[in-house]
């Protein structure tokens, strides 16, 4: 047998499912819904108080949220796609939300805090000098050093994600 890596006979195949890294779970909840909406797809964020339509119609978003009601607690982000006829597949992932001041600029924020206390804020990918105290409070002292990403959902409501450094 050849040692040339371009020759497929070089590789020794193992049984499927035995080796490799498993895929991470994409959805926290998956279900189906019966919706008579006219479009084929919708995206939404469900908070404890409201269904916020990101894409598609309110009718499709509320139908998807109703289908998820017994499967996941808000807040979550969900996508629904028509599969066949009035049958839709719906997937949702739990998110964390925070209220930031109404005058907060931009659509995406990234705050990096190091263990030495240095802070760097980016607004829509550009360095920013201001300090958003509400953004730091959203981190809740979980980590000494972290990266916090925030994406505007609507108005003063933001989806946040925090990763330790």
Image: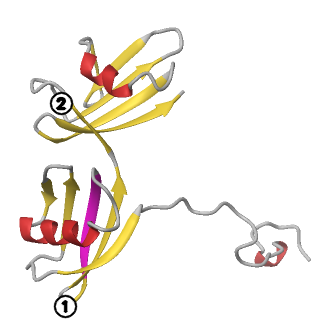
Which stretch appears magenta? Answer: 76-82
> In the image, is residue 138 above or below residue 58?
above
In which quarter of the view is residue 44 placed?
A: bottom left
Who's the residue at 66% across and 60% down the image? 21
> Eyeballing the image, is 150 above or below 68?
above
Q: Secondary structure at mark 1?
A: loop
Residue at the image point whose x is 20% and y is 49% from the top: 48
**Residue 132 at least partly seen:** no
Which residue shows up at 9% across the image and 78% down it? 37
Callout 1: few (<14), some (14-19), or many (20+) C-alpha neighbours within 10 Å? few
Q: From the viewer's perspective, is 82 left or right of 156?
A: right
From mark 2 to mark 1, how far is it between C-alphas? 39 Å
Residue 83 in the image: state x and y as whole percent: 27, 84
Residue named by callout 1:
85
Left or right of 81 on screen, residue 3: right
Q: Identify whether 150 is placed above or below 56.
A: above
Could you say which quadrant of the image residue 160 lies in? top left
Q: x%, y% of residue 119?
A: 40, 13
Percent from the top left, x then y, of residue 99? 20, 32
Left or right: where 55 falls relative to 31: left
**Image coordinates for residue 121, horizontal then vertical, percent:** 33, 20
Q: Residue furthest bottom?
A: 85
Q: Main secondary structure of the magenta part?
A: strand
Q: Which residue is mark 2?
A: 106
**Camera-side residue of 55 and 162:** 162
């Amino acid at each position: 047998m050849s040692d040339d890596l371009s020759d497929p006979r070089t590789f020794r195949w193992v049984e499927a499912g035995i080796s490799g890294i498993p895929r991470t779970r994409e959805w926290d909840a998956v279900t189906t819904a019966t919706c008579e909406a006219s479009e084929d797809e919708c995206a939404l964020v469900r908070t404890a108080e409201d269904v916020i339509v990101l894409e598609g119609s309110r009718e499709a978003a509320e139908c998807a949220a109703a289908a998820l009601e017994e499967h996941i607690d808000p807040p979550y982000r969900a996508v629904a796609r028509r599969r066949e006829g009035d049958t839709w597949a719906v997937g949702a992932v739990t998110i964390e939300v925070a209220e930031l001041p109404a005058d907060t600029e931009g659509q995406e924020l990234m705050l990096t805090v190091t263990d030495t206390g240095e802070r760097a804020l980016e607004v829509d990918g550009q360095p920013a000098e201001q300090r958003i105290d509400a953004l730091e409070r959203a981190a809740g002292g979980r980590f000494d050093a972290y990266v916090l990403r925030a994406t505007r959902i609507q108005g003063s409501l933001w989806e946040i994600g925090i990763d330790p450094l």
